[in-house]
Image (cartoon, rainbow, N blue to C red):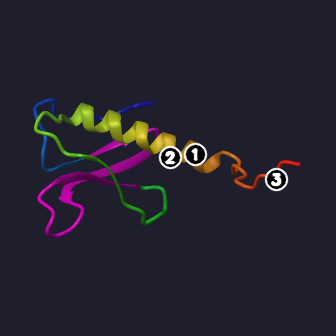
Amino acid sequence: MARKLARTEPQQQGLVFEDQGRTFTCTVAPRLAADPVRWWWFSVSDGTTHRYAPFVAADGDTDRTVQDRVVAYYDEHLARRAAPPVSRWRRPAT
C-alpha cells in the first residue's frame, strides 16, 4: 500500500496520488455552478469515467487528510458494490 505524498501544508486546489496501483485525481469545485460550497471531487484510474464528490473542502485540508478520506471512501464504495444485494422484499405476516 504505497502512497506518494507531496505536501503536508493546507491544500485547496487539487492533487494526484497513487494508492494500491490506482491513481486518484482530486480537485476542488462546487457541486453546482451557483453553489458557493466547494467539494472534493475525485476520479480513479480504474477504467471508469465516474467522478465522486464525497465531502466538503475545508480550510485545514492537507494532502494527507484528503488522501486518507478519499481512499477510505473509495474502498468502502468498492466493498458495498461487491457485497451481495440486500433483499428489500418482505413476506407479509400471517
Magenta span of residues: 16-44
Sequence-wise first label, 1 or 3: 1
- Which residue is nearer to you in this view: 94 or 47? 94
Q: As shown in the figure, which amino acid type bears the numbered disc 2?
A: His
Q: Can residue 5 be seen in this view?
A: no
Above or below, 2 against 11 in this view is above
Q: Neighbour class for label 3 at 10 Å: few (<14), some, many (≥20)? A: few
In the image, residue 10 lies at what x, y percent? 11, 35
In the image, residue 85 lies at what x, y percent? 69, 51
Q: Distance between the residues labelled 1 and 3?
A: 28 Å
Q: As shown in the figure, which amino acid type bears the numbered disc 1?
A: Arg
Residue at 13% of width from left, 33% of height from top?
Answer: 60
Q: How far apart are marks 1 and 2 (CA)?
A: 5 Å
- Say what secondary structure mark 3 lies in: loop
Sequence-wise first label, 3 or 2: 2
- Which residue is nearer to you in this view: 24 or 82? 82
Residue picked out by circle 1: 80
Please report contact status of discs 1 and 2: CB closer than 8 Å, yes or no: yes
Q: Main secondary structure of the magenta part?
A: strand
Please report contact status of discs 3 and 2: CB closer than 8 Å, yes or no: no
